[in-house]
Amino acid sequence: MIDRLHYISQTNAEVSHLEAIEQVLHAGGKWIQLRVKDQAENEVLNLAKAANDLCKKFASKLIINDFPLVSKATDAHGAHVGLNDINIIKTRLLIGKDKFIGATANTFADLQNAAAAGANYIGLGPFRFTNTKKNLSPILGLEGYKKIIDQVRNANINVPIIAIGGITPEDLPALLKTGIYGLALSGVLTNKPDTDLLIKQLYQELENQPSLYPLTPSESCSK
């Protein structure tokens, strides 16, 4: 089953990707996306192997951003593809039918296309401005989420939607009211004090708010 709280790995002057991931795992994170930019595929492969070993140690899931062949080579839980990356159908052929594929969307049309192509979950955003991504898509804000989720309901699309992009824990109550399935965080969990308390509070809040989405066939392809 797809977790409702995703951590997107980030590095800074004080911690590496692996150190940041390990901190989040120790704090209780269960769904990790390794997102490495501006590095060669062989370097990402080495990071992914180590990250997958860490995730297995904590009984957590690893998703590889942008590098489906790395996801396959490391037997990660799945891959995540951006709007301008390799398409979902090709990614599925590369990593296999029993793996999870996440896709990025900025508009309802993006979301429709990703759902039709077989994405298991969709990261919709950005919610607000974020420095973690270059060439940022148009910011959605709360009203943008409300509008798109209404369109999702009307179209009977049943793919879990994860809110992404500049989100803080304080945004969660309002975002959950729109009907999103979960959220992805990066900077607010990277090398911060009391991460374990924050993750515990976020999971409690998610559990107290029923999801719009039941378990669907698109979620049931876990190994």
Image (tube, grey):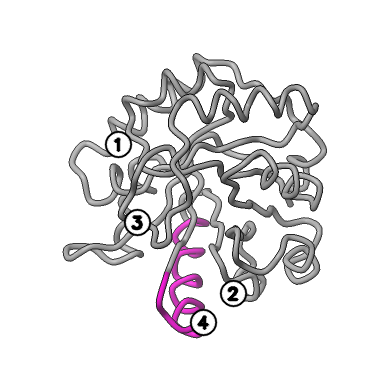
State the SS at label 4.
helix
The residue under label 1 is which amino acid type?
Asp
Magenta residues span 37-56
Chain-order first, disc 2 or disc 3? 2
Would you name the residue on which mark 2 appears? 70
Query: Badge 2, how many Cα within 10 Å: few under 14, some, many 20+?
Result: many
> Which residue is pictured at 59% across the width and 25% down the height?
147
Spatial CA span between label 1 and label 2: 29 Å
Q: Nearer the viewer, mark 2 or mark 3?
A: 3
In this figure, which residue is indicated by the disc labeled 1?
Answer: 196
Count residues near mark 4 (Cα–Cα under 10 Å), then give few for <14, some for 14-19, many for 20+: some
Nearest the eye: 66 or 106: 106
Q: Do the residues labelled 4 and 2 touch (CB within 8 Å)?
A: yes
The location of residue 170, given as percent across then percent down, is 31, 25
Give the distance between the C-alpha atoms of the residues marked 4 and 1, in whole angstroms.
32 Å
Q: Are marks 3 and 1 in contact (CB under 8 Å)?
A: no
Nearer the camera: disc 1 or disc 2 = 2
Q: Disc 3 marks which residue?
A: 132
Residue 154 horizontal/vertical position (percent)? 76, 22
Which residue is painted at 44% across and 60% down in the image? Answer: 54
Of labels 1 and 2, earlier in sequence is 2
Amino acid type, residue under disc 2 in the picture: Val
Mark 4, residue position: 41
Q: Does the magenta stretch include residue 50?
A: yes
Q: Which mark's residue is nearer the viewer, 3 or 1?
A: 3
Tell me the CA gap for discs 3 and 1: 22 Å
